[in-house]
Amino acid sequence: MASDSLSLAMQELKGLTVSVVGLGLIGGSLTKCLREQGVVSKTVGYTLDSNHAKLGIELGAVDVAAETIAEAVSGADIIVLAVPVQAFESVLQEVKPFIKPGAVLTDVGSVKGNFVSAVESVFGDVPEFVVPGHPIAGSEKSGVTAANSSLYQNHKVILTPLTHTDERALSLVDAMWSACGANVLQMSVEKHDEVLAATSHLPHLIAFSLVDTLAGNPDNEDIFRYAAGGFRDFTRIAASDPRMWHDIFLANKEAVLNVLDRFSVDLQKLRTAVADDQSQEMLGVFTRARAAREHFSKVLSGQSYVNAMNTNNVIFNAGAGSALSGAIRVAGDKSISHRSIMLGALAEGVTEVEGFLEGEDSLATLQAFRDMGVVIEGPNNGRVKIHGVGLNGLQAPPGPIYLGNSGTGMRLFAGLLAGQSFDTELTGDESLTKRPMERVAKPLREMGAVIETAEGGRPPMLIKGGQALCGMHYDMPMASAQVKSCLLLAGMYAEGDTSVTEPAPTRDHTERMLNGFGYSVERSGATAKLAGGGSMQAGKIDVPADISSAAFFMVAASIAERSDLTLEHVGLNPTRVGVINILRQMGADITVSNEKTVGGEPVGDIRIKSAPLKGIKIPEDQVPLAIDEFPVLFIAAVCAEGETVLSGAEELRVKESDRIQVMADGLAQLGVRTEVKPDGIVIQGAKMHGGTVHSHGDHRIAMAFSVAALRAEGEIVINDCANVATSFPNFVELANRVGMNVKVNGDA
Ligand code: S3P
């Protein structure tokens, strides 16, 4: 509801009388709250049992106890029907003659279709002044004695107006509930009844039934005596009012039966799984349910999750900090984490992963495979167990696959889904929706895939299953590991060989991991090649710390005076070490020790000490090897003496943001002038002052400006930082631990 019409309605409310017909827990809590808040002129309560209404006065729940319905309704500006759902029609007959012109009628029933039908049968149609409503709050207690003025605080109230419902009436009912601290939302009558059947009515039915079953057991005393937390938690709602629930089930019969039938089928499957020792089936249900429950808890408590994340403006306030010191292990490698789930899911056997990045991007990939029937245990402190289904074992997902912010996820999925027997739709957040997908869709179509993209080759991507793919050779026009990986994954499902030649070396994690899982990828010069129709065997994967996340601390420790910092177990794949090469060329003091190979990937510890940096012309062959590190390398360039020139980096313009322009804009806010080129930037070493910058939802821009604050003359306020959680969820914690100074604010 627009805030101006809501505040007008709040004003009007002050002069109005609210009458509740049926003064029990729900109605009494409403009037008690309205009284305490002083937001209406008068509250009136009516119940069949006049003693109850008088009790309402004693308890401070209402101002006036009406003796008759006529008395309650005739003076009311807002009439709230809080009677059992089966009583609507008869109560409406009694109420109708006394409704004064301009009055508003609403209700609190748990079923909206049945209220609307009752109104229609009494009035002939649904008058404009009727606003069906339902507060999603309650307790197993009942009666006005249980009235609680904070019952609706932070609870949802659903209003289900019809197309012709009067705007003023709707605003007044909205204002009344909002005044009680409720979050008021609107949906259609049908939608409401479907949603409630699934989320409220079915759970009550099951709770009543389970307790009844157990109570009918001859050993029931023992069962109840020893019943512990699980039983108590699960069956609390079986103590709810039986008559009320009887009425609700009759009123919402059809929607309840639909969801009950679905549940019965699934329960029967689970019975079979238990009877036949089907571990996969059981683990599948339990891990999916657990993940869904965690997801809901986060959404309910207003925290972030894959698809709820970047709706809030998380602000970083970054300050000067001190010398950086200590030894830390940064988050797991994002590229390898994605691939560990993808290849583990398509391998035969159980893949165990350690060091998995529990960031939103890789979690979205994990969830996508769960949705396609793969059993995945964890993540638990970076440990994940994937029960692979083999190359042809995926099942159609129940709906579109949501990949959040992840370009890697979308492009790699496009390749492997092009070869499946079922259709899929790939979607993502606002930033992902702007990124180019034609770079994968075009070559995949040449292999025989059927793919639709939205305007301009952007997501969502619709991928038609059941296509026979043909291997081919592709000369990549841009240096992209995502495009290369996409085509190799599709190539596993294609007839014959698929080969990709890259214009410059790009990260080769896909090739390494495929080889590690026994799917041979040949490398000859700039070309990677595989044959379709192979298979993979599960293995162990140790995900190293992400050099792209380590890069923030490499620059930070270089530019903050007297620093000496060690970053442990960092991935040092030669296709990723551009940042070390570039920083060393700029004069950074970086040493690498403890070098070894884990699971086919080189790793080592990186020690960085502060050093004076100088500007350089960045060699173009290093660009693909440091492609994700440029935002923070730009900060190094500002802190260096002289000029740094970057060219051959047009790909930066199509990352999570246009990283050349967004960094230049942010630096300008800090008093640093740069020269922006189509494929790069020229940066002069300069002093930075404090200021406010915008990350445009790009995690790496947010972290780069946090590092900049180490050398700025004032605080840097960085807007839109929620997406840091996509690649480096504990960035702020680690940053503060080693001596940086970053505070998280905003409405996260
Ligand atoms: C990635 C490849 C790179 C990189 C991205 C991760 C990958 O993208 O920027 O963060 O995991 O394959 P491009 O392939 O588009 O260069």
Image: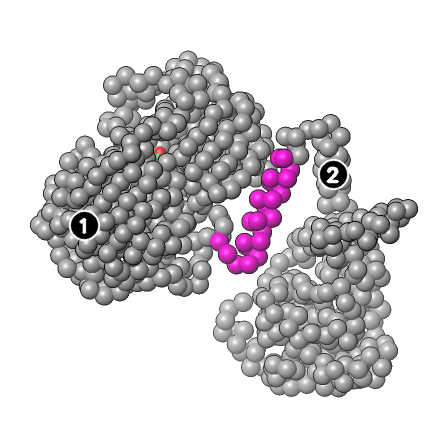
Residue 610 - label: 1
- Please tell me how crowded label 1 is: few (under 14), some (14-19), or many (20+) other residues with Cα within 10 Å: many
Q: Which residues are magenta?
A: 283-304
Residue type for callout 1? Ser
**Residue 482 showing in the rendered view:** yes
Query: Going by the picture, which residue comes out furthest to the top?
Result: 496
Query: Could you say whether the residue bearing mark 1 is in a helix, strand or loop?
Result: loop
Q: Earlier in the sequence, mark 2 or mark 1?
A: 2
Residue at image location 45% in from the left, 43% down from the top: 358
Helix, strand or loop status at disc 2: helix
Q: Is residue 88 left or right of residue 419?
A: right
Give residue 466's position: percent from left, percent from top.
53, 23
- The quarter holding residue 36 reads bottom right
Q: Where is ligand 1, by quadrant? A: top left
Q: Quadrant of residue 743?
A: bottom left
Disc number at residue 263?
none
Q: Residue at 28% across / 22% down in the picture?
A: 501
Dividing the picture into quadrants, the one containing residue 373 is top right
Task: Determine whether, in the image, residue 190 is placed left or right of residue 24.
Answer: left
User: Dot 2 corresponds to which residue?
Assistant: 267
Specify whether residue 364 is in view: no
The type of colouring in the image is one colour
* Up-down relation of residue 236 to residue 573 (above or below): below
Horizontal and vertical percent position of residue 13: 61, 81
Amino acid type shown at disc 2: Leu
Above or below 66: residue 541: above
Residue placed most toward the observer, 161 or 18:
18
